[in-house]
Image (tube, rainbow, N blue to C red):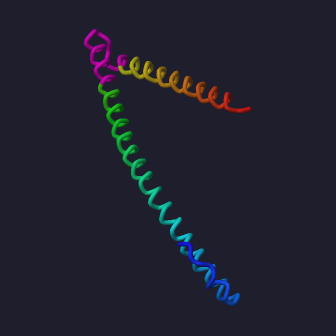
């Protein structure tokens, strides 16, 4: 892209400014093309990772629901009424979720506290 500067010495000021603008436009266009190419590959990889993560989250949710229902069915088979079994399992899972959120919050708070000077 570098040219011999000797022909530019003979140009008038408006022609020189025009040549600078043309060179700048070409340079910016080349950089934009490089950035688009680089980001396009990264965004494609990110999209694939997000798709796989969403599928995994869906599978985990369905599995957790089936596991909860099987625990409820086991409790009913052991003699507990169906509504009591549902409330018991719901209470246990809610407690576990709250504890997990609390632990995640504490870890996040600790991690951010350690990074500050």
Which quarter of the figure has residue 82? top left
Residue 20 part of the magenta-drawn span: no
Q: Is residue 51 above or below residue 16?
A: above
The residue under the point 39% across, 43% down is 49
Q: Which percent across, then down, holds residue 6?
A: 63, 82
Kindly report the secondary structure that dominates the magenta region of the rendered protein. Answer: helix
Which quarter of the figure has residue 50? top left
Quadrant where the C terminus sits is top right
Q: Is residue 59 above or below residue 103?
A: below
Q: Which percent across, then down, holds residue 12?
A: 69, 90
Which quarter of the figure has residue 70? top left
Q: Nearer the viewer, residue 29 or 116?
A: 29
The residue under the point 31% across, 13% down is 75
Report whether 97 appears left or right of 70.
right
The residue under the point 40% across, 20% down is 87
Kindly give the residue lying farthest to the left in the view shown: 77
Q: Which residues are magenta?
A: 67-85
């Amino acid at each position: 892209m570098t040219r011999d500067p000797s022909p530019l010495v003979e140009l008038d000021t408006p022609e020189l400014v025009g040549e600078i603008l043309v060179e700048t436009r070409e340079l910016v266009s080349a950089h934009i093309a490089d950035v688009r190419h680089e980001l396009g590959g990264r965004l494609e990889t990110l999209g694939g990772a997000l798709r796989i993560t969403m599928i995994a989250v869906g599978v985990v949710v369905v599995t957790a629901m089936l596991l909860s229902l099987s625990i409820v069915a086991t409790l009913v088979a052991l003699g507990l009424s169906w509504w009591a079994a549902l409330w018991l399992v719901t209470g246990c899972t809610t407690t576990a979720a709250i504890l997990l959120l609390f632990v995640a919050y504490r870890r996040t708070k600790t991690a951010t506290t350690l990074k500050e000077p």
